[in-house]
Amino acid sequence: MAPNWQEPRVLCPEHLRVQAYFDGEVDAVSAAEIERHLERCAECRELHAQLQRTRQALKSELSYFRVPEPLAARIDRALDHAVSAERSGRSAGTPAPPSGARGPRAARWWPPRALSRPFWTGALSGVGVSALAAAACLVLWLPTLRTDPRIEGLLGAHLRSLMPDHLIDVVSSDRHTVKPWYAGHADVSPAVADFDAQGYTLVGGRADYLDHQRSAVIVYRHGPHIINVFTWAADRQALPAESTRSGYRLLCWRTGDLQYCAVSDTGWDELRDLSALIQALK
Amino acid sequence: MPAPEVFIPTCAIECMDDKRRRFEAQVLPHLDAAHTFARWLAPAPADAEDVLQEAVLRAFRAFDSLRVSDAKAWLFAIVRNCHYTALKQRQRRAQVPLPEEHDIEDGPALIAGTPDPEQVTIRSDEARNLNELMRLLPAEFREVLVLRELEDLSYREIAEVTGAPIGTVMSRLARARRALREHYGAQLAGAPRAVP
């Protein structure tokens, strides 16, 4: 028989449930059902035994690769680099130091050398270390300036969505495809429409965890920009209508009991346009 | 006391240090696991190391804006993305196709991306142990097997890492295990193993 990675023959229809049982992925009721099935079905009994043998062999033989010491040191240096880059005010959008960069950068440094950085020297010429420390204290002293964690969550979800293959779960410009998809994937059913004529093309949908629930994310494209519109069940206090984090803009509003928030690197006018279009939907 | 506006949006020194500490406490414990995953994705150790470093950096930059509930699966997802990005770049640069070229093709292209069956027979005869056989499996199979059996991820976590629905994870895992059994049956059934 020519070996093939595809299905060899018809399998017992219960084989996936037997596997789920083996992997500990079923509840007690299903487990009892599957155990009864195993008593009757020789094929599945054999499958279960084979799954056990396969696991044993894999666990005992497959290589596990601990991080070698030089790599751990390299990663530590790269993190030092990232810390100092963020500390000097460059935002998350800045390109990383190339992964090959293994310069003779010092290990962790403390006390701060921030004043040696050109940005600080430019911005603070004449102001001493004491002013820097005082300003740092001021930031810590002003809790009102702290951003709502939900804003951070939204920005994080937006940035993550821009990573390869993370943007869209259901690809469609048809709202009749996108809207029903949310039924099984999110806790809310958002207003969905394609505003292609107005310049906001519906490209698909996604589900994201936000504020302890599964929010529905509608993805629009406006020119070269991606706009994520998050929707979840509104709760407690409202989000600020407009906020800016790391160069991204977040426009939030409520419609009925749904909280909406559009996140993008486009301008405010575009976000307000899109928000108005969505709010005009029934 | 002068307090220039410029300080306010910038993370203060103490806060960066705190971020680094939280990152080291929550994410770095999974570094060995992530390295193992990277090594099983990328055949060349040097490539896996670059992938891991890039992934840790990306994770660090996204860290403070995220509520990371499952740091392991989250880090793995970033490792996987970095691997495929790096793979695409290598392939774009390379004139000579790499042996792992089929890795780049995703789900629907599974059949096309599978190594030639004839060749697999010959090569799997040569595979002296499970490690070598695993390297012969299509990337989609190898990945779910490593995540499930070596890294002990749940179906939900595997779905999160691979971006596939849970149903797809289940059927892919079943096919991967079957493929392994069929090509390694004698050893799995308890026959004497060839010494590597």
Image: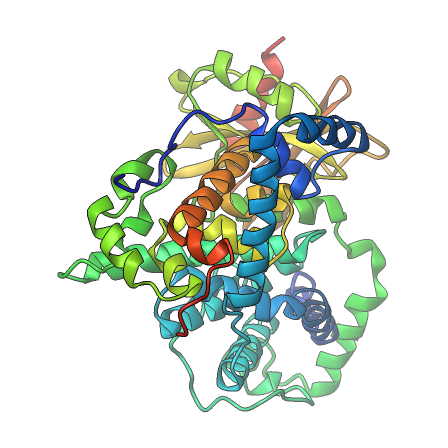
Residue B14: where, in percent of width, then height?
74, 75
Please name the residue shown 29% across and 58% down the image. B125
Q: Nearer the viewer, residue B124 or B35?
A: B124
Instruction: Identify the image quadrant of the N terminus of chain B.
Output: bottom right
Q: Quadrant of residue B93?
A: bottom left
Of residue A253 and residue B112, the one placed in the foreground of this image is B112
Residue B48 x %, y % = 42, 68
Residue nearer the viewer, A10 or B147: A10
**Residue closer to the observer: B131 or A115:** B131
Quadrant where the C terminus of chain B lies? bottom left
Total residue callouts: 0
The image quarter containing residue A225 is top left
* Residue B185 locus on image (x, y percent): 43, 51
Tell me which residue sits at (26%, 51%) in the image: B121
Q: Residue furthest left?
A: B95
Give the vertical position of B89 relative to A160 (above or below): below
